[in-house]
Amino acid sequence: MIKPFFDSKSTLLALFLIVLASAFSPVFASEEEGHGEPEPFNASEVILHHVKDDHQWHIADWLVVPLPIIVYSEEKGLDMFSSSRFYDEHHNEVEYNGYKLEHNHITLAESGKSVFDISITKNVLMLLITAGLMVFVFLSVAKGAKNNKGKAPKGVQSFFEPIILFVRDEIVKPNIGHHYEKFLPYMLTLFFFILFGNLLGLLPGAGNLTGNIAVTMTLAVLTFLITNFSGKKTYWGHIFWTPGVPLPLRIVILPVEIIGMFTKPFSLMIRLFVAITAGHIVLLALISLTFIFGSIYVGFGSSIIVLFINLIELLVAGIQAYVFTMFSSMYIGMAVEESHDH
C-alpha cells in the first residue's frame, strides 16, 4: 500500500502557514496600492502599529473593526461615536464633530486641548474578551466540580483542575504558608488572566494585552496594595527597624528597605511587559523580512522560523504567568509571615 505524500502533521503545518500568511500579508501590504508608485515598506512603523494600542482593530486591510469612542471635555461635554468617523474612504485621518485623532491621541480640533478619553480601544476590548472567556471557562469548571463531586473530573474540569492544583500546591501554598487560602482566589485569577492574555495575544490579528504596560502596571499595583495592606508587625518592623542590626546601619538600611517596597512591583511590571512585547516584535520582524526582500524563499524560511518561535512563545506564556504569580506569592508571604522570635 502506497503511503499518501501528505500525512496529517504536514497538512496541519501547511494549513498553519497558509493561515499565518493570509492573516498578515494584507496588513503588511502598501495602503497606496493602485495610486502610483507604492510606498517603501517601513518595518518599524508596521511593528509599532501592531504592538501599540489603537482606537480601531486593524486585523487586515480588508477587515478593520471600528470601536466606540467615548470622550469628555469641559467645552463639549460627553460624546460617543464610532472610531470610523475619524477616517475617510482612503483610510486617511479626518476631523469629526470638533475632534481630531493624531498618533492615536484625541484632541479638540480648534484648541488642540486633550480630552478625557475612556474609549473602548483594542486592548480594552481584548481585556473584556479575556475576562469573559475566563468567566465562561471557570463557571463551567465550578459546575463540573459540583456535579462530579467524589468522581473523576470530566470535560473542561479535567483540563483545568490539575493546573489549579499546581498553582495552589506548588506556587501559592509553599510561598505564603498557613494563610494561603485567604489569597488563593487572587493568585488563581492573576495566573489565569496572564496565561489567557498571553495565549490569546499570539493569535493572528489579536491585541497585545499583556504587552501593554498599563495592564502590567495595574497587576503589579494590585500585588503591591495586597502585600502592604496585609503586612504584619514583623514585616513593617523589618522595614523600619531591622532587628539585630546596629543603630548606625539602620539609618542606611531604612531607605534601602523603603525603595525595595517599590522596586518589587516595578520589576513585576517590567518583566511581563518586556517579555511579551519582545516576543511580538521578534515575530513581526521575521514576517517583515518577506516584504523587505520581496522573495518567496525568504518568506518560506521566515515562516518556518516563526512557527518554531511561536512554539517557544507558548512556553513563555506559561512561564511568565508562573513567574508573576510566584513572585507575588513570595512578596505576600514575606508580609504575612509570623515572627520567629521566642
Image (cartoon, grey):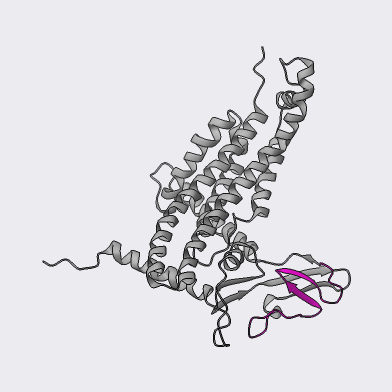
For residue 224, what is the image quadrant?
A: top right
Relative depth, front residue between 291 and 321 = 291
The answer to which of 122 and 103 lies nearer the viewer is: 103
Q: Residue at x 60, y 45 (%)?
A: 271
Picture coordinates of residue 51, whole percent (x, y)? 59, 62
Residue 104 location in percent, x, y?
70, 68
Q: Which residues are drawn in magenta? A: 87-114
Q: Quadrant of residue 123?
A: bottom right
Residue under the point 85% across and 77% down: 110
The x and y percentages for residue 132 are 58, 59
Residue appearing at x 71%, y 67% in the figure: 119
The vertical placement of 129 against 329, above or below, is below
> Hey, which quadrant is residue 214 in on the image?
bottom right
Q: Residue at x 55, y 54 (%)?
A: 278
Relative placement, left or right, of 142 versus 303 is right
**Residue 97 lies in the magenta stretch:** yes
Q: Is residue 99 visible?
A: yes
Q: Tell me the chief SS of the magenta region.
A: loop
Quarter occupied by the C terminus: top right
Question: Does the stretch in magenta take in 66?
Answer: no
- For this orientation, the residue located farthest to the right is 75
